[in-house]
Amino acid sequence: MINHPDPLASDAIVTLDALALSRAIHARELSCREVMQAYLAQIERCNPQVNALVSRVAPETLLAQADQRDRQLQRGQSMGWMHGMPQAIKDLAATAGLTTSLGSPLFAEHVPQEDAISVARVRASGAIVIGKSNVPEFGLGSHTYNQLFGTTGNAYDPSLSAGGSSGGAAVALALRMLPVADGSDMMGSLRNPAAFNNVFGMRPSLGRVPFGPTPELFVQQLATEGPMGRSVADVARLLATQAGYDARAPLSLKADPALLEASLQRDVRGLRLGWLGDYNAYLAMEPGVLSLCEQALADFSQLGCEVQGCQPEFSLAQLWDCWLVHRHWLVQGTLGALYDDPSKRRWLKPEARWEVEGAAKLGAADVYRASQSRSQWYRALLQLFERYDFLLLPSAQVFPFDARQAWPRQIDGQEMDTYHRWMEVVIGPTLAGLPCISVPVGFNPAGLPMGLQIIGPPQADHGVLQLAHAHEQLTQWVKRRPPGNLL
């Protein structure tokens, strides 16, 4: 075992950001075994309270893998920046040799033979997969609970929702059970849980991270995998690992992922930021959400940015209708066969059945009209980007809510007519395929966190990261307010 200064005791190891941890491992200040031992101890301390990590690999197996990584370093060999770092994969992504349940009893024994593309890239960078992070059933809904593993509690109050569908990942990250985390995002699944747990979550540009391998290659253009971290620099580094063209994903981008590793330092003075707010009172907001985000606008002004209110020239009701068609259609594509089998349908949660049944009412003309609406929305945002460099929008419409509740039935007296209407705020960047990161912006009087979306123009992932980094350097919310009750 490598001797290290006393400050790098077990508690100090898990508080290191991922890049700092990588440097300590490669400088031989920490052994991979020490790192694994520290994280396993943190998991044993915190995970029983929040249920964020599931399908965990046996500790003796993980320590043996850590020892192997140490022997590689002794020979002067490093697999990459994640060499020896623990990583839990979101339970929607395929992991060769490890259960991938999708949060469903129907897949409780499902062990893939092949890694998802992004998982393979993380492994190739030296990460040691320690298990999976919990998800809602099939990733549906922004509240992480399922019949197989149960509910994941919030890092700041385990009785409240962690968000989702990357809820397990966000909570494990916030509680220092992971140095960095992967996730995926269709309807805010990297952004909402980041906001609910005071960390960073980035939805990359459409095609930035190859999605798959999957049976269907050309239609599934809403969901994407992406990174989460306790610092923007960690997010950027993990995104660079996940990103890059793969022929198995024909719509993936060919830009060099190394561009994402360029300096995050940027003089942001003079950048024009458009504040979308609640879309002129179209969106229902829990009291305190909008005011907290509006307070954060002063942070950007302090950085020298010019912040102005703005609105897209587009009907937000039309955008929601467009979303419902796309969502029904694509969910039916993945779950339709399960629904058609009565013995399996009974295991699908009501929201999953509702999506499939909604698709049964659609025709080809409905789908095409929805695609036209999506295209019009994209053009409306392009018009805004002629005037603004970036757009700002709350990451959620509510603060973390009672985890026993399947979903918020109303917001500020307004009834929510679907299981996901309460997260309508996130659909705009998804439908436009734009890069978007949720940055922490503080806490309400009850001590619950909130985030703000920074939305960039097409394929401006690095620019989004730079503005988020500037905001982080000013505010430091992750370091100022860690979830102390559990840590």
Image: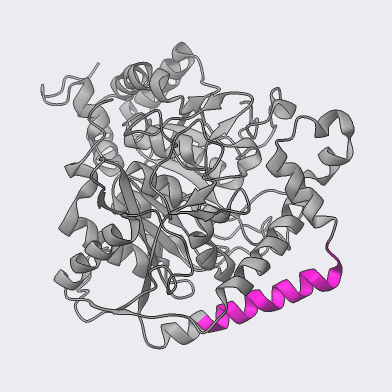
Which residue is more in the foreground, 386 or 122? 386
Left or right, 3 with reference to 237 = left
Q: Which residue is drawn at the image coordinates 65% and 49% (left, top)?
A: 212
Question: Is there any visible trace of residue 83 in the rendered image?
Answer: no
Q: Quadrant of the N terminus?
A: top left
Query: Is residue 301 among what the camera can see?
Result: yes
Residue toward you, 446 or 473 = 446
Q: Is residue 193 above or below residue 362?
A: above
Residue 80 in picture, x, y percent from top left: 39, 42
Taking the view exactly as shown, the residue that stands out farthest to the top is: 60
Q: Residue furthest left?
A: 6
In percent of width and height, residue 38 lies at 29, 21
Q: Where does the C terminus fall, quadrant-wise?
A: top left
Q: Position of residue 453 (x, y in %)?
A: 38, 62
Magenta stretch holds residue 371: yes
Q: Quadrant of residue 456?
A: bottom left
- How many numbered tags mark residues here? 0
Which residue is at the front of the view, 321 or 328? 321
Residue at the location (50% across, 60% down)?
426
Left or right: 439 as drawn, with respect to 418: left
Residue at x-position 19% and y-position 65%: 299
What main secondary structure does the magenta stretch of the protein show?
helix
Instruction: Please say whether residue 369 is one of the residues in the magenta stretch.
Output: yes
Residue drawn at (30%, 42%) of the image: 448
Most distant residue in the right direction? 341
Q: Position of residue 178 (x, y in %)?
A: 37, 33
Q: Quadrant of residue 326?
A: bottom right
Colour pattern: one colour
Please indicate whether residue 145 sits to the left or right of residue 101 in the image: left
The magenta segment: 362-380
